[in-house]
Amino acid sequence: MIVTTFADTVGLSGALVKNQWLTIKAAASLLLREHPEGIVIDCGELTNVSEDGSKTFLEAVKDIQAGGSRIVVCNLPRQVLELIKTVPGVRSQLPIASSVEEARASFKLTLSAPPTDSDRPAAENGVVVPLMDGLDPVHAVRIAARAAFGTNSPIHLVYLLEVGRSVALGTPMPEREAAANAMLDAATVAARELGVAVSAHVERVRDAQEGALAAIKNYKAGYAVLCVTPAAALEDRWSEFASILLHKAQCDVLIGRAAITSHA
């Protein structure tokens, strides 16, 4: 097997017939210094991968995620992809993209990182705004700005991107990621127009309700704002979501929707 590097990408070529992560790790570590958000492993030139060789990817995912970064594998030959599906633990934990470009787009999705231990004190008592398809980003920001008025509390926009348990949590999802980015952009613009401090990021979660509660806890929020669109207001899932926040969120909770118009 031959290992090459370019920009944020590790290229593999030849046969991968045993666990070669220690060989690849040195090159990957160098790339991660320049690209801490994550790196791509391009497998387009692999000619053969054995079951033992496929464990290279599992080792890579565990190692890189433990360091707080992401890894996405792309351009897997069909026969390699079929093999990976049969190896316990590999397919469910390995984020796979169809191309280098798709993987890079996924890395760029996060607008700003979630809080770290060093910056959490400054973020305490802010307003967490969970966002998903069916929620109203602009009206939620307006409500959040009122909650933050007079305290200079920041607004934390958290898009909850649900990922099915059958695939790795970091798997790129181009269409859904684009929708998440558009919603975060709209909410960020609205917050800045109101003159409030704002951060925004995507949180990949298995369950949106659990993800919202975790974000509220991690940010040590003073408020949480859940705002549905008029069209979605009658959907049972949002009634359940609101109930979970009202019963379990350890902060003030505001539930809202914009006024219904004759066109709604």
Image: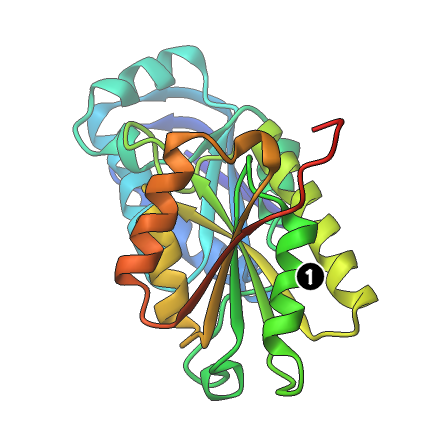
x 44%, y 73%: residue: 219
Image quadrant in which you'd find residue 78: top left
Residue at mark 1: 142
Quadrant containing the C terminus is top right
Disc 1 packing (10 Å; few <14; some 14–19; many ≥20): some
Nearer-the-camera pick, 123 or 191: 191
Apparent side of residue 52 relative to residue 191 in the rendered image (left or right): left
Image quadrant in which you'd find residue 193: bottom right
Residue 149 image offset from top left, x and y in percent: 66, 80
Quadrant containing the N terminus is top left
**One can see residue 23 in this view:** no
Farthest residue in the left direction? Answer: 88
x 66%, y 33%: residue: 101
**One can see residue 199 in this view:** yes
Nearer-the-camera pick, 65 or 169: 169
Image quadrant in which you'd find residue 195: bottom right
Farthest residue in the front direction? Answer: 262
